[in-house]
Image: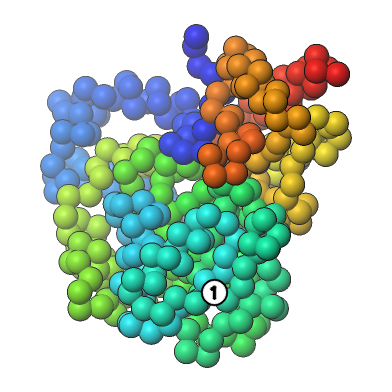
Amino acid sequence: MGRAFNFSAGPAVMPEAVLQQAAAEMLDWHGSGMSVMEMSHRGKEFISIYEQAEADLRALLAVPTHFKILFMQGGGLAENAIVPLNLSQGGAMDFVLTGSWSQKSLKEAGKYGPARVAASAQTDGFTTLPAPATWQIGADSRYVHICGNETIHGVEFHELPDLKALGCDAPLVVDFSSHVASRPVDWSRVGLAFGGAQKNLGPAGLTLVIVREDLIGHALPHCPSAFDYKLVNDNQSMYNTPPTYSIYIAGLVFQWLKQHGGIAAMAQRNVAKAQLLYDFLDSSSLFENRVAKDCRSRMNVPFFLRDESRNDAFLAGAKAANLLQLKGHKSVGGMRASIYNAMPLEGVQALVAYMREFEKTQA
């Protein structure tokens, strides 16, 4: 069938050039006689891969020097436990509920301390974002958690909230799993950001944590050693064996991002791709997107056929057209197109062309 346009929410499409380079280096990385997946994580070869990846990521995301970059495991779900184990100190935590993933974060954090709902968009079906001015954040809050982009419901904070402007001194924790590296980050508003790599940075297995250094060193006594940010940082993310091959691939993605103009250029392309798809949906008589325009995700675009009896025909036709993984999450139904950094504009153009033709045939 050849290379298709893969709209999977994650694990997601990878840059083709990265896959080609990884294939070329599979058996022998740079004359070492080894595959990267065979290397000791403490050997000079892998250390050079790790150090380059960290340096490239810091430069790409403009991460300030007082933030530490940790390469961990467990994905975003594990961080829902690891963050409160490191930051809560047994105190209360506030959560802004904007979809399925922030709901999971709230539930998991509740195992380690009082987890409170500061605001929720559930009554709107998670199609809007609660205005920060309406958030009820406790004066004793250890941190405020948001999911920057909800992959299932397709809502995104286009601007991170300024907690200081709300009179809140608690650090902002951002789950940026599904939009990391898709746009610049205002680090002055962030205390900690985390995300799985398998959507925008590389393959599954690697979890990225970027944490302000003053938030390190406060883990609860029962925090597992491998999840203690201080131990992880003190050991250069190698307290235990890190996900070496995933770090290597992520490093190649970082280099690809640099070669294509960096984060600012990616942000422009992502806006153009999303606008193309949303413009079609808004003009369609058959398809619809239900998310408020001011918080539509640039990464994950859920949409529905107004006549859902045509869903199977739509998916079958899409597959025949080499447009894959468009079925929506089982919890919400419908369709979803994930258009991460590695999805080219041509992929979105092909999707829109297919949707337009499908609409004509169903008239």
Q: Which quadrant of the rendered structure holds the C terminus?
A: top right
For image coordinates 20% across by 62% down, the residue present is: 226
Choose between 60 and 181: the one closer to the eye. 181
Q: Is residue 93 shown above or below 236?
A: below
Give the residue displayed 50% in from the left and 56% down from the top.
Answer: 101
- The residue lying furthest to the front in this view is 309
User: Which quadrant holds residue 216?
Assistant: bottom left
Q: Is residue 185 above or below residue 24?
A: below
- Report helix, strand or loop for mark 1: strand
Amino acid type of the residue that numbered disc 1 sits on in the rendered structure: Val
Q: Residue 236 appears at what percent x and percent y?
A: 24, 60
Specify whether residue 162 is in view: no
Where in the figure is residue 325, as x and y percent of width and height? 54, 28
Q: Is residue 37 left or right of residue 279?
A: left
Instruction: Relative to 140, say whether 113 is above or below.
Output: above
**As drawn, which residue projects farthest toward the bottom?**
139
Q: Which residue is mark 1?
A: 117
Q: Residue at x 29, y 80 (%)?
A: 218
203 with respect to 164 (left or right): left
Task: Give the answer, above or below, for where 247 lies relative to 87.
Answer: above
Residue drawn 43% across the image and 36% down it = 11
Disc 1 packing (10 Å; few <14; some 14–19; many ≥20): some
Give percent across and percent down for residue 352.
73, 26
Figure quadrant of residue 316: top right
Q: In this rendering, does residue 284 appear at all?
A: yes
